[in-house]
Image: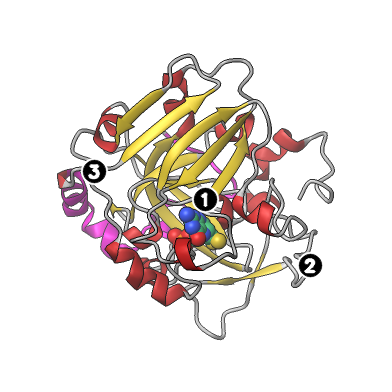
Amino acid sequence: MLIKSKPSISEHEITDPLIFSQRRQIIKAFAATTLASATGIGKVFAGETNDNRLTTTPAEVVKNYTNYYEFSFNKQDSTKLAQALPIDPWNIEISGEVERPMRLNLEQLLKQQTIQDYVYRFRCVEAWSMVVPWQGFQLVNLLKLVKPLSSARYVKFTTLFNPQAMPNQLTSSSLDWPYTEGLRIDEATHPLTILAVGMYGESLPKQNGAPLRLIVPWKYGFKSIKAIVKIELLKDQPNTAWNQAAPNEYGFYANVNPAVAHPRWSQHSERVLGSSFFTARRETELFNGYGEQVADLYRDMDLRRFI
Ligand code: MTE
């Protein structure tokens, strides 16, 4: 399957040359992990580009600069501390407004999905960005299995609650734990919305949300919730961790939008992770550059009001 995104990214641009030349070995290694053993490996996302400045962020940068507040508010510490998280076995519950609620483990879930590559821009609300080759599957393909009822208008996602392994769940009151996020059903079933189980051709590192995380490339990064254990289909818009903590700073929609400043900083431009000190900041694009695919979802909405 070919996922088209505009501005899209050509294979030679998005793939780290080393990874590209070693692709066969990486596929073998990925397929050998328990996560991927029962699944197929899809094609690298390929397309044309109209943005020659874009290159894949080096994997080491993405792995060592993480936001994972259950562990730490410091981006290097969260990377180290997340290594203690037990992720095998991993159970997931899918429930709520559905005909066939499910409780299954990750291996069972992955047997029903085909793993594909999705190379996406990722824009944090803190005004930094990266380009990451994820491996995963479209969320819609999981939701179909539980047969959503017509009353299902929203989807809520919940991170694991394990205060022994995730120290801030005990000691920090800055968020209401466990971390939660939510999407409208049309956003959740959009073909760009994926659940990722890998990146750079390997299983997802713990600090980047292993074993299962959401990726919604046209929204600020905090929507892309890590270590998901529960997916609920709901009638009403759910409360979400950041929206509850600071509703005027972190909206439920959180669509990337350079025209709407965060109350404490501009969203006009972004620092590109992995670029040199002298590289110019990148101008942020509405919907993070995915407007052609997603703008229609918001055609009747005032994007200044529904942040
Ligand atoms: N999910 C959970 N459970 N906990 C978190 O702290 N941080 C969010 C999001 N998902 C976060 C989370 C934020 S603020 C961002 S920018 C991205 O994860 C960062 O993803 P990365 O660390 O893989 O770059």
Which mark is drawn over residue 263?
A: 2
Image height of 290 relative to 126, above or below: above
Precedes in sequence: disc 2 or disc 3: 3
What distance separates the C-alpha of mark 1 from that of mark 3? Answer: 22 Å
SS of the residue under disc 2:
loop
How many numbered badges does the structure rendering display?
3
Q: Does the magenta stretch include residue 206?
A: no
Q: How crowded is mark 2: few (under 14 residues within 10 Å), some or many (20 or more)?
A: few
Q: Which residue is drawn at 37% across and 70% down?
A: 79
The residue that mark 1 highlights is 224
Going from N to C along the chain, the mark reached first, 1 or 3, is: 3
Magenta span includes 28? yes
Left or right: 278, with 230 as reference point: right
Disc 1 CB within 8 Å of nearest ligand 1 atom = yes
291 and 174: which is toward the camera? 174
Residue type at mark 2: give it.
Pro
Residue 121 visible to the viewer: yes
- Give x and y (percent) for residue 296: 72, 34
Q: Which residue was labeled with disc 3?
A: 89
Which amino acid is tagged 3?
Pro
